Image (cartoon, coloured by chain):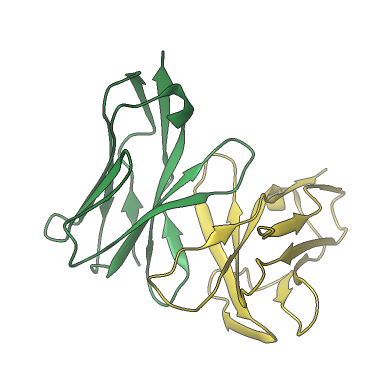
């Protein structure tokens, strides 16, 4: 059973370009979370999605960032007009249910570098 | 909002000793607390979950305690090995199912 898959693993973008990060959850998991890890910082929650729905986006910056989890295909985190401060590791996690006592399974992350 | 502190950024111990990592939290008391391991360049890996009505939980060489009065969890690795060297993250739910993570404690086990 394949784990959580993320691609690309590394992404380089110039300031002002768009970054698109993809996440395929574990088989059977319909709950996806996105986290960001800045250098020397802890993991920070960004957004929680179920199929076709955004459940909690309280950690998402109000501008330039968006996320979706369509009925078919991977979840996508989109960052428009990237700036240097967006350089970070972005992790996706999935879980089989939306319960607080459920562990989350993380992907290997996408390392975004903005030049 | 909830705040988590892992009071040691780094911990160095010798092989065979017990490593003890501390996680303190503020504000409301969570019903569950989780511990994850993260290796360089990789995503976190779930280790243990402990509920507020569980004082202690064990898994092989790992032991977690949860003191809701002190608002503290302790994570122990007994008979530590160099392969245990990694960053260990404490996490809990603030509201809903999203996790709030501490910054982690980097454990180095020397042979």
Compared to residue A69, the image places residue B45 above or below, namely: above
Compared to residue B93, the image places residue B111 above or below, namely: above
* Placement of the C terminus of chain A among the 4 image quadrants: top right
Task: Residue B24 in the image: state x and y as whole percent.
Answer: 26, 50
B111, A86: nearer the viewer:
B111
In the displayed orientation, state which residue is furthest to the top. Answer: B111
Question: Which quarter of the picture shows residue A107?
Answer: bottom right
Which residue is found at the position 81% from the left and 52% from the top?
A: A8
Which residue is found at the position 34% from the left and 54% from the top?
A: B4
Q: Which chain is green?
A: B
Q: Which chain is yellow?
A: A
Task: Residue B66 in the image: state x and y as whole percent.
Answer: 20, 55
Q: Is residue B85 visible?
A: no
Please give left or right for residue B74 compared with residue A105 in the image: left
Compared to residue B42, the image places residue B67 above or below, namely: below
A52, A77: nearer the viewer:
A52
Q: Is residue A70 visible?
A: yes
Question: Which quarter of the picture shows residue A76?
Answer: bottom right
Task: Residue B50 in the image: state x and y as whole percent.
Answer: 29, 60
* Placement of the N terminus of chain A among the 4 image quadrants: bottom right
Task: Residue B60 in the image: state x and y as whole percent.
Answer: 33, 42
Please give left or right for residue B75 compared with residue B36 in the image: left
Compared to residue A43, the image places residue B7 above or below, namely: above
Question: Which quarter of the picture shows residue A91?
Answer: bottom right
A99, A86: nearer the viewer:
A99
Which residue is found at the position 56% from the left and 60% from the top?
A: A105
Which residue is found at the position 30% from the left and 20% from the top?
A: B16
In the displayed orientation, state which residue is furthest to the left. Answer: B69
């Amino acid at each position: 059973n394949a784990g959580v898959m993320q691609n690309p693993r590394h992404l380089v973008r110039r300031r002002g370009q768009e970054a698109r990060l993809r996440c395929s959850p574990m088989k059977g998991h319909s709950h996806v979370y996105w986290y960001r890890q800045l250098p020397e910082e802890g993991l920070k929650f960004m957004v929680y999605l179920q199929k076709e729905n955004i459940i909690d986006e309280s950690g998402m910056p109000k501008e330039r960032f968006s996320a979706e989890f369509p009925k078919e295909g991977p979840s996508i985190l989109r960052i428009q007009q990237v700036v240097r401060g967006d350089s970070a590791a972005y992790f996706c996690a999935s879980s089989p249910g939306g319960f607080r006592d459920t562990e989350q399974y993380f992907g290997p992350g996408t390392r975004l570098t903005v030049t | 909002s909830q705040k988590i502190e892992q009071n040691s950024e780094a911990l160095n111990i010798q092989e065979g000793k017990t490593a003890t990592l501390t996680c303190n939290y503020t504000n409301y008391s969570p019903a569950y607390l989780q511990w994850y391991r993260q290796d360089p360049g990789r995503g976190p890996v779930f280790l243990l979950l402990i509920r507020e009505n569980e004082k202690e939980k064990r898994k092989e060489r790992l032991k977690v305690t949860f003191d809701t009065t002190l608002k503290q969890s302790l994570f122990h690795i007994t008979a530590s090995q160099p392969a245990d060297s990694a960053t260990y993250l404490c996490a809990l739910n603030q509201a809903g199912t999203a996790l709030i993570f501490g910054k982690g404690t980097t454990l180095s086990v020397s042979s």
